[in-house]
Amino acid sequence: MTDFIVKRGRKYYYRRRIPMSLVSKYNDKTHWHFSLATSDRVTALRMAREHAVAHDAEISAAETGGHYRVHAPGMVGKVARSMAKTGKYSGVLIPGMMEQAQLNPDAKFSVIFQRMIAEKPLAKATIESFQRSSDRWYQINGDDDVNFIQRKHVEKYKSLIMQMPSRPPHEILKMSVFDQIKWAAKHPEKGVLSARTVNNHLTAIRSTLDFAYRKTSVIEGEDNWRNPVSGFNLEVDEKTEDNKRAFEVEEIQAILSPEFCKYAYTDARYWIPVLAFYTGARLDEIAQTTVSEVGRTDAGWYITMANLEENTRTSKNGISSRTVPLHNAVERLGFARFVAMRQDGGHEFLFDLDHFRGSKRGSKVATAFHRYFRSKGGAMDTTRLSMHSFRHSFRELGFECMPQYVEVMQGHTLSGESLRRYGKRIYHRHDVMRRHVVDKIDWPEITIKPWSPR
């Protein structure tokens, strides 16, 4: 017997196809679909049968051109029980038969996704990441009405994404999800996607469904709606995730060698790694530097950088920026000529990069840089090394300097005692930082060629 009920989350819903003869009466809706406001299956079945009685009468009247009879409340249950014995129900939707439904094309996942990226102010990198996640969703679960997405679909998606390889060759990335999983099983040394990456995939699906609920009218039974992705995130081991190491001196010299200029065919590709090496600054701090933040004194060049703590725009003590001295080697590489060129051109930013909410300006440069040094193979072909490794290297090179000065140079927040001793002004004493950090470090010799206009 067909029961007309569908369970979503904890609640049961009544769902039944509307015959074509009645579609116009219901403003072109294709289904009766509403919440039964109960999580008890027996109660839901009883209520669904009562609704079925009324709808069958309406259908019959439409087919015969007559009027349908409205039963008194006390009679509806009796008629429903009688009809339940016959099992004569047609044109219905039940669990396991959803593919037979007349789907609302405006409620397809792909349609909602495109609306979301068009209407929400998402960074380009976020859109690209979400697009990749949604493409994999279609491969695994198809492109269905968002009303039919259940937790079992999310569980299947998560399970398969967790088996996908980490950083496979480019030709493998072009394969389907299922073929990539087969490849990963044959190459266990490559590892699988990290917990953080899996969670990013789930975030894309969750965000799309949240958008459908909050910004569209396609979610049916919205009063009892719950995002089916909720609760599926993996626990992230921060110690495991943040396992970047410093570059060894030999690795720095191999990277910043004459071969570097073949990779660094843009100004950003040339200067960002160089500045990361000589300042220990964060990628985003360097990438979003403006021309006006670069200056020079008799002691040398400096850059005023935003203090971008790992998860906030400013430090907890309200120190939003610092002034970082540059090693004299930077000037010998042609930094003065580069800055003059940017000034003469009337440029706002030091580098021509897409500006995505500030924090994403350097992402493409970093990706290209990682590809460059990992291509050298050996110990450098690892995800434990990245642009951020220059930051760790700077700290190691500065081991013989006073720790407080290195902390300030790298934009870390001093403890309360140190801050009281040195004061917030220390963050802009680039002359002090030069004496106590830059001039004291025993810098590895690098052999890159001086900059020339790209």
Image (spheres, grey):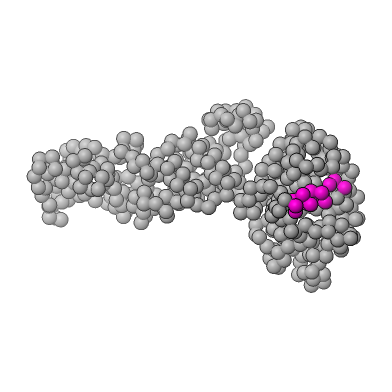
Query: How far across and down, in percent of the image, does residue 209 sit?
Result: 44, 48
Quadrant for the C terminus in the image:
top right
Query: How far across and down, in percent of the image, does residue 95 sit?
Result: 33, 40
| Highlighted range, magenta | 332-344
Q: Residue at x 53, y 52 (%)?
A: 121
Left or right, 425 with reference to 238: right
Q: Residue at x 31, y 38 (%)?
A: 101
Q: How many marks?
A: 0
Q: Main secondary structure of the magenta part?
A: helix
Q: Is residue 334 magenta?
A: yes
Left or right, 380 with reference to 88: right
Is residue 23 visible in the rendered image? The answer is yes
Name the foreground residue: 149 vs 386. Answer: 386
| Above or below for 160 versus 294 | above
Name the foreground residue: 299 vs 133. Answer: 299
Quadrant for the N terminus in the image:
top left
Query: How far across and down, in percent of the image, does residue 359 sit?
Result: 65, 53
| Above or below for 143 versus 301 | above
Left or right, 232 with reference to 386: left
